[in-house]
Image (cartoon, helix red, strand yellow):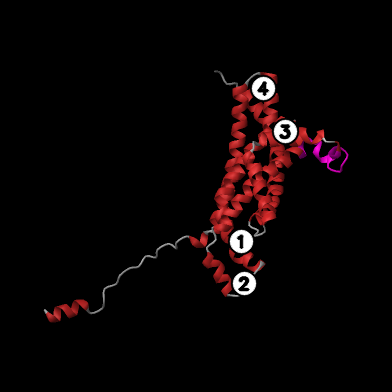
Amino acid sequence: MHFDFDFLLDTLKQLIAAVPTTLGLFFCSLILGGLLSLVIVTMRVSPHWLPNRFARAYILVFRGSPLLIQMFLVYYGMGQFGVIRESFLWPVLREPYLCAVLSLALCTAGYTAEIIRGGLMAVPVGQIEAGHAIGLSGFALLRRVIGPIALRQCLPAYSTEAVLLVKSTALASLVTVWEVTGVAQQIIQQSYRTTEVFICAALIYLFLNFVIVRALGLLETRLSRHLRAAPAQRTTSRPVSGTTETRRATS
């Protein structure tokens, strides 16, 4: 197969022009899903059965069903109800971009809530008891003891979720949002050159995910730098003064 490098460069330019749309989908859904996940995880760890069961059901539904079906239900399904079309939500739900953001946020919130819950459960009980012993309680205990430890525990799994979210933005093209994958499909329809176009798109997604993984890795290193062992100090041994003379005197 012959690769036309001029065509590849032109394709890369067109796909790079769609990167802001992909990043917009990613960051909007990441922030909205993160805020929603805090609410879900608060309900999930609640001792009251009603919010706890609701959070369990939410996580089960959005983790157990395909994101594509969720996106289709939001984009195509909501408009089937006259109540929604006549409500204040319709200006939002009729926009493909906002529907894609909402679908991605609802889905990632279920996964992120479980990641945060796992981080909270990983906090040693002794650390919490030590915080109580020095007079910390409530928000101060959460900010100074529980939060930092849970955040360090969450970051490795959350970086994986962030990578999956970037790749999931490709599904937005199915609801007429022209991000990187959507533009790639348009180019393929015009040129019939599938391999070259998808290679260019894959390189862009690979670069975006590399930057995200590196950024979260640096954050994880910064938060856990006090846990790393200090470098061993070199010590030079000096002969004890008078040892040689003492041996000579006693021999």
Q: Mark 3 highlights which residue?
A: 72
Q: Is residue 230 magenta?
A: no
| Percent of width and height locating residue 245 | 18, 79
Between disc 3 and disc 1, whose residue precedes?
3
The first of marks 2 and 3 along the sequence is 3
Which range of residues does the magenta coloring cover? 83-98
- Distance from Cα at disc 2 to Cα at disc 3: 47 Å
Residue 147: numbered disc? 1
Question: Magenta region, mostly helix, strand or loop?
Answer: helix
Q: Earlier in the sequence, mark 4 or mark 3?
A: 3
Residue bearing the label numbered 4: 188
Q: Position of residue 153 (x, y in %)?
A: 55, 55
Q: Is residue 109 visible?
A: no
Q: What residue is at 77 percent from the left and 32 percent from the top?
A: 76
Mark 3 to mark 1: distance in Å?
36 Å
Q: How far across and down, in percent of the image, does residue 251 sit?
A: 11, 78
Q: What is the crowding at mark 3: few (fewer than 14 residues within 10 Å), some, or many (at least 20)?
A: some
Name the residue rendered at 30%, 70% in the picture.
Answer: 237
Q: How many marks?
A: 4
The mark that comes first in sequence, 1 or 2, is 2
Q: Which residue is mark 2?
A: 136
Could you tell me how far apart the alpha carbons at marks 4 and 3 are, in whole angstroms?
24 Å
In space, the residues marked 1 and 2 are separated at their CA atoms by 13 Å
> Which amino acid, mark 2?
Leu
